[in-house]
Image: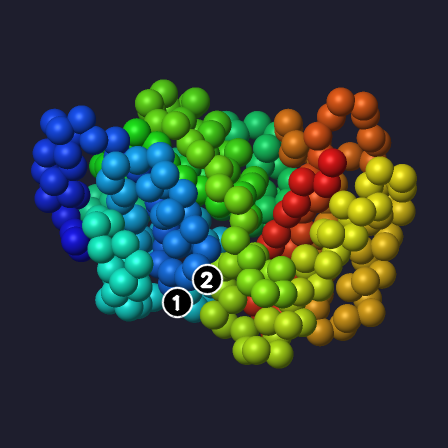
Amino acid sequence: MVIDSKLSLQHVLEEFKKEGKTIGLVPTMGALHEGHISLIDFAYSYCDKVVVSIFVNPTQFNNAKDLEKYPRNTKKDAEFLRAHQPETIVFTPEVSEVYSDKVESESFDFGSIIQYMEGEFRTGHFDGVGSVLKRLFNIVNPDKAFFGEKDFQQLQAVKKLVEITGQDIEIIGCPTSRNEFGLAQSSRNFRLNSDELKEAELIYKALSKAKRMFESNSIESIEHEVKTMFKQHPAMELEYFNIVKTKDLVPTQDKETGENYRAFIAAYLSEVRLIDNMAIN
């Protein structure tokens, strides 16, 4: 079922809610792939009905070229979903349905969790994400919403968002789906050819190396090793590599007993920007 009107969607969902059914939301920007399917399967393990929104959100792109190049094929995406799970409700609103007549970001106080990594290199990105999700949550009014841990910083920001807005939604993180080379599934991967996809496995190798080294090596030496790996592969340009405390996502050079840490990475390959992260202890 494909719906492009928020009023039509709300009417359909209201009937399900009257039957006591639990509603899950998987927000996407389209260009769907197996990673999205894993999110949808995860959502069905928690919910009776699942809504997949397909909406390329203009307010979260700080680079106009990225917005222009973002792959769009709603018909293909709907067919892809129908083949996998025909009961899924696909919501494909126009910009005016989501933002009315004022397409701009709100400002949210996400605290330290957005100050580094993506927050440092993509100014305004998380305000754009928060702005669209606040609206989508109000339109769909789901019981639960599902996000991949591949965008772990975003996942933490979304949890903070519902705390800020007071929206009664459970945010659930889902394991990262990876291809045969370990590369995190992403819509941006469609812009890479087969040789580049193989080259991009360097990201997963770097994170895995950091995880293996973490217990017995300093953070400084881990960072040096990762930077060396990228210098040996000039096809890829490392933008950042940080090891952070999971609780606040602040980069650190110190390891403390009882703390959880994650490694975050962003790199360019043929002008395609790829990000990933991994728990390392």
What is the distance, in whole Å, between disc 1 and disc 2 at their CAs?
8 Å
| Quarter of the image where the C terminus is located | top right
Residue drawn at the location 51% of the way across and 66% of the way down = 189
Above or below, 71 relative to 176: below
| Residue 86 badge | none
Above or below, 93 relative to 72: above
Viewer-nearest residue: 213 or 231: 213
Identify residue for label 1.
71
Q: Secondary structure at mark 1?
A: loop
Above or below, 34 relative to 167: below
Q: Position of residue 48 (x, y in %)?
A: 25, 37
Q: Position of residue 167 (x, y in %)?
A: 33, 24
Residue drawn at the location 81% of the way across and 62% of the way down = 229
Front tag of 1 and 2: 2
Identify residue for label 2.
187
**Image quadrant in which you'd find residue 37:** bottom left
Q: Amino acid at mark 2?
A: Ser
Residue drawn at the location 10% of the way across and 38% of the way down = 11
Q: Secondary structure at mark 2?
A: helix
In this rendering, would 98 be left or right of 229? left
**Image quadrant in which you'd find residue 30:** bottom left
Q: Earlier in the sequence, mark 1 or mark 2?
A: 1
How crowded is the residue under tag 2: few (<14 C-alpha within 10 Å), some, or many (20+)? some
Q: Position of residue 233 (x, y in %)?
A: 77, 71
In this rendering, would 11 be left or right of 198? left
Circles 1 and 2: CB atoms closer than 8 Å: yes
Residue drawn at the location 56% of the way across and 40% of the way down = 153
In this rendering, would 83 be left or right of 209? left
Q: In this figure, which colouring scheme has been used for the structure?
A: rainbow
